[in-house]
Amino acid sequence: MKPPDWDNVAQAYAAMSHESRHLVVFPVLLDLLEQQSPKRILDVGGGDGRFAEAAARRLPQSSVDAWDSSPAMTALALERARESKSFRVLQEKPPLCTYDAVILTAVWMGWETDEQCEDELRQLAESATDDGILLITVTHPCFRQERFSTFSTDFALPWYFDNGRPFTVHVEADNKRIQLSNTHWNLSAMSGQLSAASLNIERLHELPDLPSSVGDGGSPWLVVQASRKRRHVLDPAPDPDVARSA
Ligand SMILES: C[S@@+](CC[C@H](N)C(=O)[O-])C[C@H]1O[C@@H](n2cnc3c(N)ncnc32)[C@H](O)[C@@H]1O
């Protein structure tokens, strides 16, 4: 199966407003953002802009930018921004060292190689200010084999150490059903990619499924709270005159 073609599935995916991202992940991200009161927020891979709109409404003192590489998703976000006027949709890659909080939700599992993950995460890190916070959400790699309220996969636990393995996700909500191809990165691979992108893990938040879920248990979503690695300030080079006279 090919990687997701977001231009083709944009309409159907955006119409799933009861998918567990909205009901389980977004409220936690909004709480975490509120605790930080960031001035500038960026949602990378922000899809139809629903989260950016919610963040702008919840944090009226903040400015919120959304950026997505899919033109069809960007068109949906622009439509939403036109209606709400409370956030901005970027039409080109975000600027560097600008954002106090950077969000990436349900995007990382769409990246297919180690190099791609490291490059994309590095760009994400570089869009944050030095002391910015990054909130990166993925489907929990330890529970892919479980059935959750709005998605299930064809992944099997014996493949846990098989990094880079593609698997199929079935998403079902609002009487709609779509199928996506994702790539498995286990916790070791994820922490390695974050480190290669000069990001430190500050905290992990493992989210429970919807209370009404009749699924198999386990955690559907993992939020990685990360920060940029600080550059070490090197000791100044010794003054050659002082060194000679010593
Ligand atoms: C599963 S959707 C998630 C959308 C949104 N974050 C949400 O939770 O509603 C993944 C989105 O990431 C976008 N995407 C994938 N790779 C990207 C990249 N490198 N930069 C920007 N957007 C990207 C896709 O176009 C798609 O809209």
Image: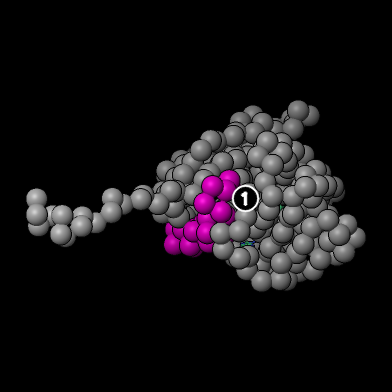
Query: What is the image's colouring?
Result: one colour
Instruction: Find ligand 1 in the image and state its quadrant.
Output: bottom right
Q: Which residue is mark 1?
A: 100
x, y percentage for residue 81? 84, 61
* Amino acid at pointer 1: Asp
Magenta segment, prevailing SS (helix, strand or loop): helix
Quadrant containing the N terminus is: bottom right
Tag count: 1
At 61% from the left edge and 58% from the top edge, which residue is drawn?
A: 98
Observer-nearest residue: 157 or 220? 220
At 15% from the left edge and 54% from the top edge, which residue is drawn?
A: 242
Decide if residue 20 is on the left or right side of residue 142: right
Query: In the rendered image, which quarter is residue 237 located in?
Result: bottom left
Other residues around mark 1 within 10 Å, as few (<14) / some (14–19) / many (≥20): many
Q: Is residue 56 above or below residue 34?
A: below
Decide if residue 197 is on the left or right side of residue 133: left
Decide if residue 15 is on the left or right side of residue 152: right
Residue 129 located within the stretch drawn in magenta: yes
Specify start and end residues of the magenta stretch as a single range: 112-134
Q: Is residue 243 visible?
A: yes
x, y percentage for residue 56? 79, 50
Q: Is residue 22 above or below residue 239?
A: above
Q: Is residue 190 above or below residue 215?
A: below
Query: In the rendered image, which quarter is residue 28 located in?
Result: top right
At 15% from the left edge and 59% from the top edge, which residue is drawn?
A: 241
Observer-nearest residue: 118 or 124? 124
At 88% from the left edge and 57% from the top edge, which residue is drawn?
A: 84
Observer-nearest residue: 137 or 131? 131
x, y percentage for residue 115? 44, 62
